Image (cartoon, helix red, strand yellow):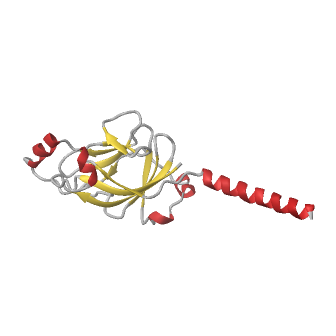
């Protein structure tokens, strides 16, 4: 009887240790974020603002029709052609040849169209993936992140021509 109990306890301990190892892997839930035009984004904190040592991407606007997602501070990224967002794993991302180069979201020859998947490594070394969901116009302030735009900035841009593809909405997931 003691031997049976010992085997049961040992089996339970082995099973729990396997679960503990699995739980140590921190996978964020899918999150949606609107990257504000010309702003910087720190993926780990999901905060946007000015350039700093912690930001991972810059949603750069070169002109009315030319914009790109720029990895910053050692972050790396790559578009995955035909990527199936839900199927992408950390092992898949590790096997990709990530780059510090800009990813075009421009009107002409832009890669960041609705549905496009980008895999990345953050400046802190965590892996992640994002998928383009849509764009928001410069004059549209109906998305949650628009609360970070100052009243003065909103007044100013409403006096300028609108840009239809100004803010970039992505769904993303981080693997720590």
Q: Quadrant of residue 60?
A: top left
Q: Residue at x 35, y 57 (%)?
A: 170
* 133 left or right of 164 in image: right
Left or right: 44 as drawn, with respect to 104: right
* Quarter occupied by residue 117: bottom left
Furthest toward the top, the residue is 53
Q: Residue 80's spot in the image, x, y percent?
A: 44, 59
Q: Nearer the viewer, residue 152 or 115?
A: 152
Q: Position of residue 111 (x, y in %)?
A: 33, 58
Is residue 108 among the parts visible in the rendering?
no
- Say which of 98 and 20 sits in front: 20
On screen, residue 148 above or below 139: above
Q: Decide which of 91, 81 is in the foreground and name it.
A: 91
Q: Quadrant of the N terminus?
A: bottom right
Measured from the top left, where is residue 88 in percent x and y?
50, 61
Looking at the image, which residue is at 32% across and 57% down? 112
Task: Pick out the residue farthest to the front.
Answer: 1
| Quadrant in the rendering for residue 100 | top left
Image mark count: 0
Residue 173 x %, y %: 45, 55
Q: Residue at x 59, y 52 (%)?
A: 25
Residue 35 makes an appearance in the image: yes
């Amino acid at each position: 009887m003691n031997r049976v109990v010992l085997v049961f306890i040992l089996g339970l301990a082995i099973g729990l240790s396997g679960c503990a190892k699995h739980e140590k892997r921190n996978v964020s839930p899918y999150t949606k974020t609107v990257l504000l035009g010309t702003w910087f984004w720190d993926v780990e904190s999901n905060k946007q603002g000015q350039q700093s040592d912690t930001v991972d991407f810059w949603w750069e606007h070169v002109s009315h029709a030319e914009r790109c997602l720029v990895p910053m501070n050692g972050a790396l990224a790559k578009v995955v052609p035909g990527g199936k967002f839900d199927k992408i794993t950390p092992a898949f991302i590790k096997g990709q040849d990530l780059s510090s180069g800009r990813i075009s979201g421009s009107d002409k020859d832009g890669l960041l169209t609705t549905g496009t998947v980008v895999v990345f490594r953050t400046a802190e070394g965590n892996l992640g993936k994002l998928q383009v969901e849509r764009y928001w116009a410069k004059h549209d302030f109906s998305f949650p992140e628009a609360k970070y735009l100052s009243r003065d900035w909103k007044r100013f841009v409403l006096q300028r021509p609108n840009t239809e593809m100004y803010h970039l909405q992505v769904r993303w997931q981080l693997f720590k």
